Image: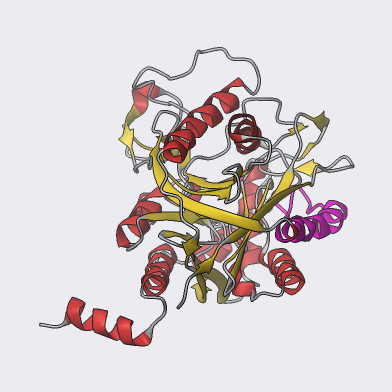
Amino acid sequence: MANYPLKAGAAAVDITPQMQVALAGHFKRRDSEGILDPLHARAIVLDNGHNRLAFVLLDLINFTEPDCTLVRQQIADVLDMPIDNVCVSCTHTHTGPATRPGFDTPRQVEYLDWAMPRMVQAARAAADALVPAEAAWGIGHEARPQYNRRFHMHDGSVRMNPGAPDDIVRPAGPTDPELPMLLLRRAEDGKALAVLANYSLHYIGDFSSKMVSSDYFGEFSRLAAERLGETCVALLTHGASGDINNVNHQKLPTPWYPEKMEPKDRSKLIAGWLLDQVQQVWDKADWRQDVILDSMQQIYELPTRPLNEDEIKEAQRDAQDQNLTEVQRYYARNWLKLLDSPRTLPQVVSTLRVGDWAAATMTGEIFCQYGIDLKYASPFAVTALIELANGHMGYTPTRYSFVLGGYETWHSGHAFGDYNCGHEMVAMAARGLRELWLKKNTTKIEAANKRSFGP
């Protein structure tokens, strides 16, 4: 595959709701009471004369497969490129409109009908802004705000966000402090065009839960424009963080933030730390204009977990039991809804390459260990796992986490995949990355296989 001079463009389009909306991400319905800061669809388009890639990041909690596929196809049509080359992902802010039904919160149909064309508009604007560009890549490190939110407790249970530090034995999983990033600047004058970074940390939520906000992801973008120049569009994609948040339940080590902070200050602090890492990589970057652009999309037929007869009887009983909490009755009703689910659900597993930077996408909230595993499995110098991309399948725990139990494993509409699905999707992504590294060249792949597996 020949290399061609790179062009890149970036754009941001406002997708802040123009009406009151039900907000996503809580057990109880919350209607918005105002706007703290705007939501955006941010887009980067790259073109090297041979291939074209598009990345679109939405300040939304998630995006269902039908909605996402529609937007991806429209972007592909408008930009005259294969849908395989389009990545649409979400930041997972919990203070944006509900994009799918959850608990007693309905899908915000009116909002999505208004916002989805604007997502396509962001990609079109980025393509219209294409200019000769240079790319660089690197990895920052920031561990301070990350904690695994699942803990082994003295009573033998595994619990999410347990509080009660005296009852905790230790965390039940790792964290990943890496900040892999792709950097883009104008070839003519070196002005910053875009940053595509990836970090394993849930939303912060350090403000009123009824105000629309893009959380620390929006702060990252705002600060990037301040520090790198107003021409810079910064995308902070969600890394493998299904079990990672910023809450120091053990109070160990000493918390990195004051006990009392003004609303949004914690988000600004974390975003600033991440931008410090971006700046360090930017200042030392090896800029290149001739880079390979490539992608590979695979479909994983996700097996859903079946309910056995005892579980069905339990759900039928609990759904009507007024002595249980509303949340417990919700889970029981949700179990019964799962009886109508297909046995398999197709999920997009995509791999994309820009030079020696690569990303793999998965649809779920992926446990951190899988992100670490994928980075070890990747041949690329810099690898990101972008979750909540090209659809949504709920939590994706590790196989041992299913054994341990806890909120993220409870069988429901937000955790319905089979026990092996995460492992199998990581293996599929690793295969895709390897083929992109070998440029999908059958001869090179066969030769590498002989050297890897032969005597």
Q: Report whether residue 401 is seen.
A: no
* Most common secondary structure along the magenta stretch: helix
Please identify the quadrant where the C terminus is shown: bottom left
> Most extreme residue toward the left, as rendered?
455
14 horizontally vs 416: left or right:
right
Determine whether, in the image, residue 216 is placed left or right of residue 143: right
Give the colouring mode of the picture.
secondary structure
Residue at 59 percent across and 28 percent down: it is 267
Provide residue 115's location: percent of width, then percent of height: 82, 53
Residue 344 appears in the rendering: yes
Toward the viewer: 290 or 67? 290
Q: Is residue 383 above or below residue 3?
A: above
How far from the left and from the top, in percent, is residue 219?
63, 32
* Percent position of residue 296, x then y: 50, 74
Residue 110 lies in the magenta-colored region = yes
Q: List x then y, in percent, for residue 176.
A: 38, 42
Magenta span: 98-127
Query: Which residue is pictured at 36% across the width and 49% down the height?
Result: 404
Q: Nearer the viewer, residue 337 or 147?
A: 147
